[in-house]
Image: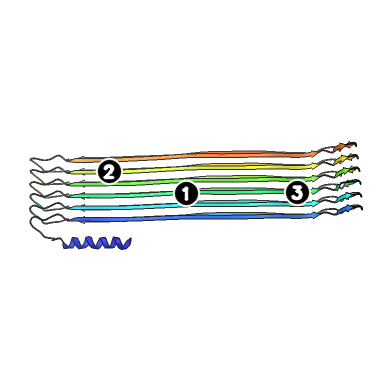
Amino acid sequence: MTKKLCAIAVVVGALTWATPAMAGVGSGGAGAAQIGAQIADTQQGAVATATSTQNAVNANVPVSIAGGNVTAGPSSATQNADSDARANASNDAETNQTQTQTQNVDNGSSCSVGCGGAGAAQIGAQVAKTDQSTDATAVSDQNAVNANVPVSIAGGDVSSGPSSADQTANSDANAKAKNDADTNQTQTQTQNVGNGSSCVAGCGGAGAAQIGAQVAKTDQGADATATSDQNAVNANVPVSIAGGNVTAGPSSANQTANSDANAKAKNDADTSQTQNQNQNVGGSSSCKVGCGGAGAFQAGVQLADTHQWADATAVSDQNAVNANVPVAIAGGDIHAGPSSADQNVSSKAKANASNDADTTQNQTQNQTVGGGSSCLAGCGGAGAAQIGLQLASTHQWADATAVSDQNAVNSNAPVSVAGGDIYAGPSSATQNADSNAKAKAKNDADTNQSQTQTQDVGGRSSCKLGCGGPGAFQLGIQKADTNQWADATAVSLQNAVNGNAPHSVAGGDIYAGPSSATQYADSNADAKAKNDADTYQAACQDQKLGW
């Protein structure tokens, strides 16, 4: 592209130097074309995937299939299980376009009689297109088991030692998708055509065209998904399938289970367009008789189109079980020790989808056509057209979904399926269950349009006889279209059970110990959807004809 522009510049220079500089009579006006084009196309795609799969087992499991007693020692095993998955996808694109055009055609000519007016065209175009797409997925799948499970399938007694095992299970999933695009376009055009001519009689008016176009299109898509799936089991479960008594030691096991899922999708697009056009055509002419009016055309176009889409989904699924459940399926008595187990479970899901688009358009047009003419008789009126167009279209869509699903069980439930008495120890277990879901969808769009047009056509004419009136056209259009849609959904599902429930299916007495268990269950769901759109339009037009 650079070579082509240089070639055009050389050709124009050659034509300019080839034109006689000091022609006196019947000189034809110069013709010149100036074209500048800038095209920037940026495409970015980023995908980040992180998967952490953990199966952590810390078990004390003595097993007797046929005959013999099973005696389990005390369990104080400590298990720390961490499963982390982090995914980060980011795109950053910056486009800067600067274009300056200066054109001087047939200025200062010494032609005296029958001079043809100069013709010139000046065109500048800037096109910037940016496509960005990011996808970040983080999955943390954890199965943490810290168990004290003595088992006797046929014959023999089962005596389990006290359980004070500690289990800390953390499952974290973080996903972040971000797009950042900045587009800056600056265009300056200066055009002087046929100014300062010393033509005296039969002078043709100058003709000039000045066109500036700026087009900026930005498409962004961001998708962030974070999923934390946790199954944490801290169990003291002695089992006798056929025959034998089950004696469970006291349970004071501590369980801390955290399941967090964070998803964030963000789009940020800034578009700045600045356009300045200065056009002087046929000004300060010394023509006295039969002077043709100057003709000029000036058009400025600014188009900014921004599309943004953000989707953030966070899911935290937790199944936390802290149980003291001695089981006898056929025969034998069950003596459950006292339960004072503590369970702290937290399930959190946070989703944030955000779009931010700023569009700034500044357009200044100055046009002077046939001003300061000293024509006295038979003067043709000047004709001029000035058009300014600003279009800003912004589309935003944000969806944030947060789901926290929690099943927290802290139980002391000895079970006898067939025969045998049940003696449940006292229950003073403490359970803190917290399920939080937060979703936030936000759209923010600011559009600023400023347009100033100044037009002087045929000003300060000294024409005395046969003066044609000037013709002028001035049009300024500003259009701002902003569409926003935000959806925020927060769901907190909690099933918290803190039970002391000895159970006998067939035969046998049930003796339940005193219950002073404390349960704190908190389920919160917060959803926030917000749209914020500001549009500012300022237009100023100043037109002077034949003053």
Q: Position of residue 483 (x, y in %)?
A: 45, 39
Image-based side of 215 in relation to 60, left or right = left
Query: Which type of secondary structure does the marked residue at label 2 adopt?
Result: strand
**Secondary element type, mark 1:** strand
For residue 525, the mark is: none
Quadrant of the frame with the C terminus: top left
Mark 3 or mark 1, which has the lower sequence index? 1
Horizontal relation, residue 41 to residue 157: left or right: left
- Return the residue at label 1: 220
* Snapshot quadrant of residue 413: top right
Q: Label 2 belongs to which residue?
A: 387
Q: Nearer the viewer, residue 71 or 106?
A: 71
Q: Residue 544 versus residue 356: which sits nearer the camera?
A: 356
User: Where does residue 541 sit, x and y in percent of width and height?
Assistant: 28, 40
Identify which amino acid the numbered label 2 is placed on: Ile
Residue 517 visible here: no
Q: Which residue is mark 3?
A: 233
| Disc 1: CA contacts within 10 A as few (<14), some (14-19) or many (>=20) | many
Q: CA distance from mark 3 to mark 1?
A: 43 Å
Tell me if label 3 and label 2 are in contact, CB under 8 Å.
Answer: no
Q: Nearer the viewer, mark 2 or mark 1?
A: 1
- Residue at 23% x, 49% y is 209
The residue type indicated by label 3 comes to: Val
- Residue at the location (89% across, 46% down)? 242
* Viewer-proximal residue among 68 and 441: 68
Dot in front, 3 or 2: 3
Picture coordinates of residue 358, whole percent (x, y) = 43, 46
- Indicate which disc, 2 or 1, sits on the residue closer to the N terminus: 1
In space, the residues marked 3 and 2 are separated at their CA atoms by: 73 Å
Residue at 47% in and 49% down:
220
The residue depicted at 8 percent of the width and 46 percent of the height is 290
Decide which of tag 3 and tag 2 comes sooner along the chain. 3
